[in-house]
């Protein structure tokens, strides 16, 4: 019983005791996992002041980071003696769309992301017209099924119920819900035509 009491005091009492020490004041905020969002955006959102301790409750810091648009997962930890570590995972952009002030990134669900393309210079397809979740969902599926093909796509848009992609001045037609198997099958057809030296302008993966 005495040992258990000491353990409880060590777990709950020691951090509170040390939290008032200047040695454990937060002196550094480290942000990990960023590719498109600038670290200062995460840092400025954190409710830290000059007397914050690494032993303070981390839930407010986590909630503040989770409120930042463009982040889909956040974890917050501490590294003694004085560092808070915020690890994030961004919503992966799949395309670029033209806006009044220039290009903006778009996520898999068709929503514009608060990332500045000038900061990370991503090589992504351009969306024609307004963001369309049918197009962006297909682009996300293509990136998973065939990253090489995804890297070649330079333009994507909706045409009626279908999605049209442009790559290397050629067109590819897909249904919005085309599975990975169909995407890979179209790539096999393209590979076969190339190996046989056949010229073509459009591949139709809708049927």
Image (cartoon, rainbow, N blue to C red):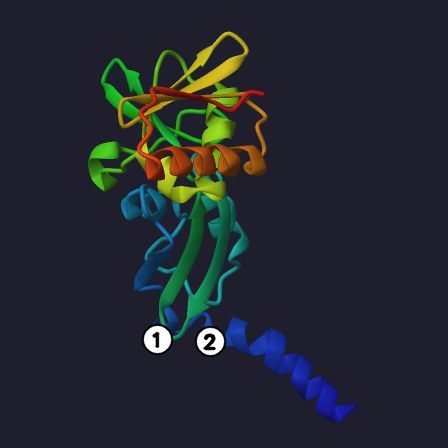
Residue receiving disc 2: 18
Residue receiving disc 1: 23
Residue at 47% across, 63% down: 77
Q: Nearer the viewer, residue 201 or 148?
A: 201
- Helix, strand or loop at disc 1? helix
Residue 64 percent coordinates (x, y)? 46, 44
Q: Disc number at residue 202?
A: none
- Splitting the image into 4 quarters, where does residue 171 fall? top left
Total of numbered circles in the picture? 2
Q: Is residue 131 left or right of residue 10?
A: left
Q: Residue furthest left?
A: 118
The image shows residue 83, relative to residue 200, as above or below, that is below
Q: Is residue 167 left or right of residue 73?
A: left
Q: Of label 2 and label 1, which has the lower sequence position?
A: 2
Q: Residue furthest bottom?
A: 2
Q: Is residue 124 left or right of residue 12?
A: left
Q: Is residue 91 visible to the viewer in this orientation of the structure?
A: no
Is there CB contact under 8 Å for labels 2 and 1?
yes
The image shows residue 8, relative to residue 104, as above or below, that is below
The image shows residue 137, relative to residue 25, as above or below, that is above
Dot 2 crowding, Cα within 10 Å, few <14, some 14–19, many 20+: some
- Splitting the image into 4 quarters, where does residue 120 fall? top left
Residue at 55% across, 20% down: 206
Q: Nearer the viewer, residue 61 or 98?
A: 98
Residue 133 percent coordinates (x, y)? 51, 22
Locate the N terminus and report the quarter of the image it occupies. bottom right
């Amino acid at each position: 019983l005495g040992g258990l009491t000491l353990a409880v005091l060590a777990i709950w009492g020691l951090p509170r005791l040390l939290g008032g020490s200047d040695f454990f004041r937060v002196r550094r905020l480290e942000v990990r996992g960023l590719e498109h969002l600038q670290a200062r955006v995460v840092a400025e959102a954190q409710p830290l002041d000059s007397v914050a301790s690494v032993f303070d409750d981390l839930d407010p810091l986590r909630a503040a980071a989770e409120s930042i648009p463009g982040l889909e997962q956040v974890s917050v930890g501490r590294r003694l003696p004085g560092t808070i570590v915020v690890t994030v995972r961004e919503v992966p952009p799949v395309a670029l769309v033209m806006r009044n002030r220039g290009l903006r990134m778009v996520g898999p669900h068709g929503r514009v992301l608060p990332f500045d393309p000038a900061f990370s210079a991503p090589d992504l397809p351009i969306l024609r017209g307004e963001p369309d979740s049918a197009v962006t969902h297909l682009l996300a599926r293509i990136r998973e099924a065939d990253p090489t093909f995804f890297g070649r796509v330079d333009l994507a848009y909706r045409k009626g119920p279908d999605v049209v992609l442009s790559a290397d001045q050629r067109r590819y037609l897909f249904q919005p819900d085309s599975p990975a198997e169909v995407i890979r099958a179209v790539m096999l057809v393209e590979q076969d035509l190339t190996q046989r030296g056949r010229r073509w302008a459009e591949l139709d993966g809708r049927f």
